[in-house]
Image: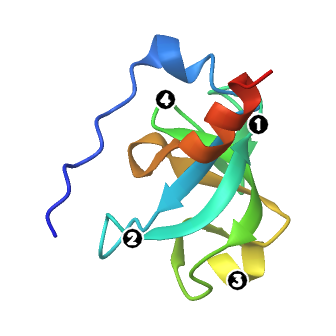
Amino acid sequence: MATSPRKEVPMTQKNHQQGRDVILYNVYWDHNSPVAKATILPVDQREEVSGQELGSQYCKVVVNYVIKRDAILPRGIGDMTTMGQAQGRCITWPYKHLEVDKSTANAAMRP
């Protein structure tokens, strides 16, 4: 089954995504494989996480639900290197490897 690649999110849209529930996709191998569900936290590109600035390509998320425990984090924090270790914690994730969770976005729009 072929799926289309996710498109880069413009910076103006990135600024409006805080608080959104998202699906995180594998960074290193099968890029269409979901590895976790998370919520985007407020973005400050100059903020440092584990000694590196977030920059415009990364956001900070809190991991709510892990799908693939052995997925490698793109920017590990200390001994935390896998998604299983990140459950309930804040990590950085590249915008190009996430998308808004449509199941929760649609539920939020219902009366």
> What whole-number distance in Å separates the C-alpha atoms at marks 3 and 4?
26 Å
Nearer-N-terminus badge (3/1): 1
The residue at which mark 4 appears reads as: 56
Relative to 71, does residue 102 appear above or below in the rendering? above
Give the structural element (helix, strand or loop) at label 3: helix
Q: Residue at x 61, y 46 (%)?
A: 103
**Which residue occupies the extreme right position in the image?**
88
Nearer-N-terminus badge (2/3): 2
Label 3 neighbourhood size at 10 Å, few (<14), some (14-19), many (20+)?
A: many
> What whole-number distance in Å separates the C-alpha atoms at marks 2 and 3?
15 Å
In this view, the mark in front (3 or 4):
3
Label 2 neighbourhood size at 10 Å, few (<14), some (14-19), many (20+)?
A: some
Instruction: Kindly identify the amino acid type of the residue bearing the numbered disc 4.
Output: Ser
Quadrant in the picture for the N terminus: bottom left
Instruction: Kindly identify the amino acid type of the residue bearing the numbered disc 2.
Output: Ser
**Which residue occupies the extreme bottom position in the image?**
70
Q: Residue 41 — which label?
A: 1
Nearer-N-terminus badge (2/4): 2
Instruction: Kindly identify the amino acid type of the residue bearing the numbered disc 1.
Output: Leu
Give the structural element (helix, strand or loop) at label 2: loop
- Pick whichever, 86 or 78, lies toward us: 86
The residue at which mark 3 appears reads as: 84
> What whole-number distance in Å separates the C-alpha atoms at marks 4 and 1?
14 Å
Residue 50 seen in render: yes
In this view, the mark in front (1 or 2):
2
Give the percent coordinates (x, y) of residue 27. 39, 65
